[in-house]
Image (tube, rainbow, N blue to C red):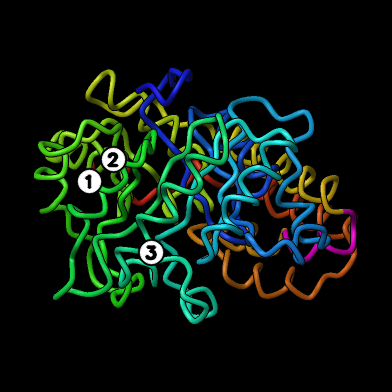
Amino acid sequence: MKIGAYTLATPLALAPMAGITDKPFRQVCRSFGAAWTVSEMVSSDPNLQFRRKTRYRLDHTGEEGINVVQIAGSDPAQLAHAARFNVAQGAQVIDINMGCPAKKVCNVLAGSALLQNEALVRTILEAVVAAVEVPVTLKTRLGWDDEHRNILTIARMAEDAGIAALAVHGRTRTQMYRGEACYDLLLPLRQQSKLPLWVNGDLTSPHKAWQIYRQTGADGVMIGRAAQGQPWLFRDMSYFFQQGVLPEPLSVAEHAEVISRHIAAIHAFYGDFTGVRMARKHIGWYVSLLPEGEAFRRVINQVDNALIQRQQLDRFLDKQIMTLAVWPCHYRAVV
């Protein structure tokens, strides 16, 4: 898969997710084979560019791979300015968010709310592409609702505007994350458009990702929620795409080491106070399938000290190493 001047080693991408795809998580997913990772979305509002939260989201210091920054907003001039600002800060690719279904984003007519106004979509795409010399990509959905699934029109606009690649989540905005993702428009989109295409939504296993990848003719798959608590999913997908079978699983000790290093990286990145709080959700995802995992999650969520959080987590993981033969995994259980 080729995006501008960049050739990706695998067709696997990590979807941008607010509050989740920070530098520590991008790094761990990349280590398992995610060839394309996107920052959490940042607002195009220039008044918000220097907030502490935004600084964290734009921190790519020492990070390997392609620096992709996602911007969100509804004003073409502000989005163009945000693109230039982020390129000046080191962004190698700009991604435009037209897929976020969150109310606080859609209420300001950004994210997937833009899909209701095709003329504005066209103006935004043209303004951002014209503003920077780096590739500009687009993340979007099928449309606003089932009666207005206008992804084919949006894709045509994107190609005309010079967008370098397109990622499509197989739901409308009104679906949010309910029900099942639908891929029926992706094959016509593939046949209509020459843009590099990622398919996104409900790709929860290597088997399903491969099936949808082949079914839609997409160039790649973009993984979002399925990577939470199992970044090694990218390793299994990469192997399955090449060999048609799953690789041997990591040992329980190897899983524990990944988790411990990830939580330590969160603490180092955010500092102890914020790091403890950012780590809680990741710990909850990691332990969700483990024996007594839910009880442990409730206990560790009360811990406010980084050192104690790591000590309690390591003790819990050491117990898993001693008692488990294999790490629980839903998509391996059904093979």
Q: Amino acid at mark 1?
A: Arg
Disc 3 on helix, strand or loop? helix
Q: Which mark is residue 120?
A: 3
Whether residue 326 is visible, yes or no, is: no
Q: Which mark is residue 325?
A: none
- CB atoms of marks 1 and 2 within 8 Å: yes
Mark positioned earlier in the residue sequence (1 or 3) = 3
The reply to whether the magenta stretch includes residue 273 is: yes
Q: Which residue is mark 1?
A: 156
Magenta residues span 271-278
Would you say the magenta stretch is mainly helix, strand or loop? helix
Question: Which image quarter is the C terminus in?
Answer: top left
Q: Amino acid at mark 2?
A: Asp
Picture coordinates of residue 97, whole percent (x, y): 47, 56
Q: Amino acid at mark 3?
A: Leu
Q: Residues within 10 Å of mark 3 (few under 14, many from 20)?
A: some
Q: Does residue 96 appear to the left or right of 245 in the view shown?
A: right
The reply to whether the magenta stretch includes residue 311 is: no
Q: Which mark is residue 160?
A: 2
